Image (cartoon, rainbow, N blue to C red):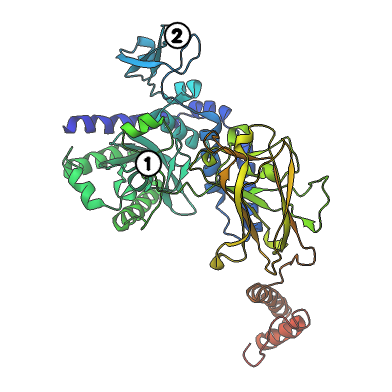
Amino acid sequence: MSEGLLSALEDYSSRVLTYEDPALQEKARKHIPAERIVSEAQEAITLAEELGGQPPAFQDAVAKGLLLWFKHEFFTWVNQAPCWRCGSSATEYIAQGTPSDLQSKFGANRVEQYLCPTCKVVTEFPRYNDAEKLLETRKGRCGEWANAFTLCCRAMGLEARLVLDRTDHVWTEYFSKAENRWVHLDPCEAAYDQPLLYESGWGKKLTYNIGFDRYGATDVTRRYTREWGEVLQRRVEIQEEVLGATLTSITARRRAGLDPSTLSQLKMRDGHEAAELLSSKGESQVELPGRQTGSEEWRTSRGETGSSFVERPPGTPFRKVSSEVDHPMSSPGKLLSGGAARASGENFPSCETCDKAFDGRSDTKWLDFGGGGVDGSAWLEYSLLKSQGSARLLSYALVSAGDAPERDPCDWTFFGLAEESLGWQAIAEQTGFVFQERGQRAHFDVPASPSSFRRFKLQVTRLRESSAANSVQLAGLELYVAEKGFETPEESCVDVKVAFKKQLAHEFETMVRAGVGMQEAIYGAIEKLSSDFEGKIVIDCKDP
């Protein structure tokens, strides 16, 4: 039984070495919009700072951007191969064929055959394992996806490894320098740092998860489970001692000839990861979705749909909203613009993203496929920047999209958030509303409320024709706030203290360099800053 696993370990440990070919990396970079991904990473950092949150490290933001690009723009999932003659996707699997010499050249060890019921021709789907060939085909299932994506990570300079899941899945890990740890990446699901996705979300019964990179092989199973005792009982394919010795041998071969400095760094990284894996117990009360890619029939047959009661993923990243929006509609109050938006989901490939709801145009739209259907739910959120403070909502307007009226919101609730600790507060509700035409702007007043909020959320609870709609969409969402109630935040006590300490240190250093004594420099610096911070901070000169 162990021969199959041992063979797979050797195969994967050799496969990842192809990612280190400079010529192959250059081919991959020709496909990757690296300049755009880097620019968007910088924008994500800036936006997080403007929202008053913790900005991601640059490298982490690049990894997330690469993940989204690969998922939404580059690779395609294959349920069954479409007919090569008529293009029909209604083909039927008939057999597994033998790869041709040419197909074998590109690592195909099996070929799926599909019959078109219309043309009566057979279409072949070779399961290629050659990363270079996959840059050309740009399609497949999890094996092809992870193979090509890990190559793209290496081409972008990210330290990455390919992870083999012995229960029939493959994904990627990337080493975050900022976090000093390996981070889970699944290109099929566009999942970032969700290691319990498979066990808690999909319902998989994991056994062996082995990571492979240019420096060796590592058993990373503990990262992906919170039921290690149960997993251990299922690990019967090979003796643990034999597995450990095999991985150690692969790692030793890959590191032979490395310089002492690199070996020392790798040893430190290994030790840190080993401690992390041993102490890893997973998150508690995790709510993660079932598998999203693949047909429902296929996912169900594999038992990977998860619980139907699990909530949808947490939503899209924040996107910057244009500050140059011109609306023909006159409305009391100030139109919010220049903030940030996010949503429960969006149609990224068609640029029907959440920020389009705030661009002031009726010919663009936000669309969320996850919000369609009888059980669909969707939300659209607007957040003011930290510099904008909070605002009191007076009214709002919704603009219907240019097509598919069945996707129109019909019932919804508006929420406001002042502080995270206070939670969302319902401030307005609408039921049974029907848009009369496409591109219609419907205006709604908000019941008088003295409260100001930093974030606003439209929660869509029912569509015009839920049974027929495959998504929810809006061309526009306009938020009008009280101009006098638009509260620009004053410096908090913490911010003032930080500013005071920085300036105090600067003045103190300047005086010391000028030859002033230590004690005199402290009192002199405080005296110089007293007028600037008068009324903002209490300065006790008895205890400088």
Please tell me whether mark 1 sits on a helix, a strand or a loop.
Answer: loop
* Mark number displayed over residue 118: 2
Residue located farthest toward the front when viewing the structure as drawn: 432
Quadrant position of residue 113: top left
Residue located farthest toward the top when viewing the structure as drawn: 120
- Marks 1 & 2, CB-CB < 8 Å contact: no
Left or right for 163, reference 158: left
Q: Position of residue 183 (x, y in %)?
A: 43, 47
Disc 2 marks which amino acid?
Thr
Q: Position of residue 256 (x, y in %)?
A: 32, 38
Give me the residue at 83% from left, 45% from top: 328
Q: Quadrant of the N terminus?
A: top left
Up the image or down, 169 lies above or below 261; here it is above
Q: Nearer the viewer, residue 452 or 132?
A: 452
Residue 229 visible in the current orientation: yes
Please tell me whether mark 2 sits on a helix, a strand or a loop.
Answer: loop
Give me the residue at 44% from left, 46% from top: 175
Up the image or down, 14 lies above or below 101; here it is below
Q: Which residue is mark 1?
A: 258
Give me the residue at 59% from left, 66% from top: 419
Q: Position of residue 407 (x, y in %)?
A: 60, 37
- Label 1 environment density (alpha carbons within 10 Å; few <14, some 14–19, many ≥20): few
Cα separation, mark 1 vs mark 2, equals 58 Å
Left or right for 259, reference 429: left
Instruction: Report the mark closest to the observer, 1 or 2.
Output: 2
Q: Nearer the viewer, residue 66 or 360?
A: 360
Quadrant position of residue 52: bottom right
